[in-house]
Image (tube, rainbow, N blue to C red):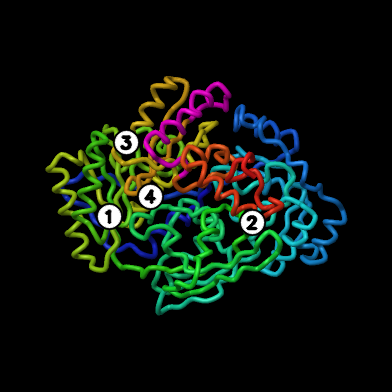
Amino acid sequence: MPHTQHEFANRTVNSCRGFHWIPSLQHSPCGPRTNVETHEGKYSANKASEVQKRSFGSAATQIQRNPAYSELTSDDVSYFKSILGDNGVVQDEDRIAVANVDWMGKYRGASQLLLLPKSTVEVSKILSYCNTRRLAVVPQGGNTGLVGGSVPVYDEVIVSLAGMDKIISFDNINGILTCEAGCVLENLSTFVENEGFIMPLDLGAKGSCHIGGNISTNAGGLRFIRYGSLHGNVLGLEAVLADGTILDMLTTLRKDNTGYDLKHLFIGSEGSLGVVTKIAVLTPAKLPSTNVAFLSCNDYTSCQKLLLAARRNLGEILSAFEFMDNHCIDLAMRHLEGVQNPLPASQTKFYILIETTGSDESYDKTKLEGFLLRSMEDGLVADGVIAQDISQASNFWRIREGISEASVKVGAVYKYDLSIPVEKLYDIVEEMRCRLGDNAEVLGYGHLGDGNLHLNILSSKYDDNRLAQIEPFVYEWTSAQRGSISAEHGLGLMKAEKIHYSKSPEAVQLMASIKKLLDPNSILNPYKVLPQSVL
């Protein structure tokens, strides 16, 4: 996902105090952070077709434009201008080109129209009209996804929520934020931190992603181990159905057992059941003491044991437990400007980033120091360092969060977001290296505390033969472990036809029934999430 310089600083500038070194651990100075480039691209209908083929291999030929959808006319454009005004209807090729492509440049559509509503009522009018006309629609937030879920496949109308970015209210007693879906996550983080709270999720793309997109994809992120899923943190939401019906579920109640809890249908459904327009989310209190440690481990077994030890010994203050293999560190050092290796003398295979957050600075510091020293004595940690100041903590996080960005600088990258039992999580990385040999570089990193692996396969260019070596093997292997082929990125276009590897036929059929009930004309985010064969 794309990042910005202040995005990484925000993690520590507002919340970190008293970073310190363990005297017996190795010290390496950490340098300043630098700006990160953004990714955009231009499109044409022909180029869109080419990119689909190179991105999806043989699967691309199976995705045909649904002939039931209407094509855009001048009358349609005139109607949209009548409700949104000229500024809310974008036909400029350069602006539409940016919205037509994902940030990796992997998925491209050929939409001719970008709509910018500023209210729920305007979204309702758009969808009602599109449903009547059978014009397919793609809801779009910050467009930071990795599975092609937020860009058109063909000529769908793009409905951007960027203009709906107001904070509606904040309950500073209970920590409940109510806002519109187009609010950028980092802006919300800054706002609630000034009120003495934090957002329950934190992502590498926080400087670009929208809270509505986070909820629509049920984004996980770096705080999941501490605060859990958005299914537990979202108290209420407002969504617009395909026919324009405004579904008001914007409650701020912590407890409400009156009937079915319908909001959960829209958390993680990737805009395929309705467009989320407003959100009420519970924000945890901001705690004054934060420490970040960067550690090296000789083998994956040590990483697992370290995780168990962290849960037992750090307990209530553990807020992040991230792992990276040595290939990730090498990649970051090559392609991320301004970062420095915290453990330059270490030659181990695995690295762990641990963050603790608590209310007592002295207690937390002593607890973390003791834990790391015991871990070194037990042979779980080969080397390690605790950030001494904000700059060093930001450097640690910059390495972890910048892996995704660094990977796209190599050329082609095949990204897989998998949930696998922790004891088997790294096996797929090693098996994939054996399968691909010297033809590609295979990286493994992710949220070890959540059992979530990000498997990245890097190559100079996209190649159908290489894709055939990767898929369906990666999905079959994950399914055999009773894992999930999408831990937090969603299914989008990339994995819509692969859902059966993680869900039973009965479950997929029930999902299709819900889709047909809420969106009978299937205008919302078509070709995504579910296989076309069940719709």
Q: Amino acid at mark 3?
A: Lys
Disc number for residue 424: 3
What SS does tag 2 mark?
A: helix
Q: Residues within 10 Å of mark 3 (few under 14, many from 20)?
A: few
Q: Residue 498: where, in percent of width, then height?
A: 53, 37
Q: CA distance from mark 1 to mark 4?
A: 14 Å
Location of residue 428 by image quarter: top left
User: Is residue 479 toward the left or the right of residue 355 in the image?
Assistant: right
- Vertical arrangement, residue 310 with respect to residue 119, above or below: above
Viewer-side residue, 232 vs 311? 232
Residue depicted at x 21% and y 41%? 383
Which residue is tagged 1? 388
- Residue reaching furthest to the right: 75
Residue indicated by mark 4: 397
Q: Say which label, 1 or 3, has the lower sequence index.
A: 1
Location of residue 187 with respect to 437 vertically, above or below: below
**In the rendered image, the vertical position of residue 282 relative to residue 294, given as above or below:** below
- Mark toward the start of the polypeptide (1 vs 4): 1
Mark 3 or mark 4: name the one nearer the start of the chain: 4
In the structure shown, which secondary structural element does the residue marked by tag 1 occupy? loop
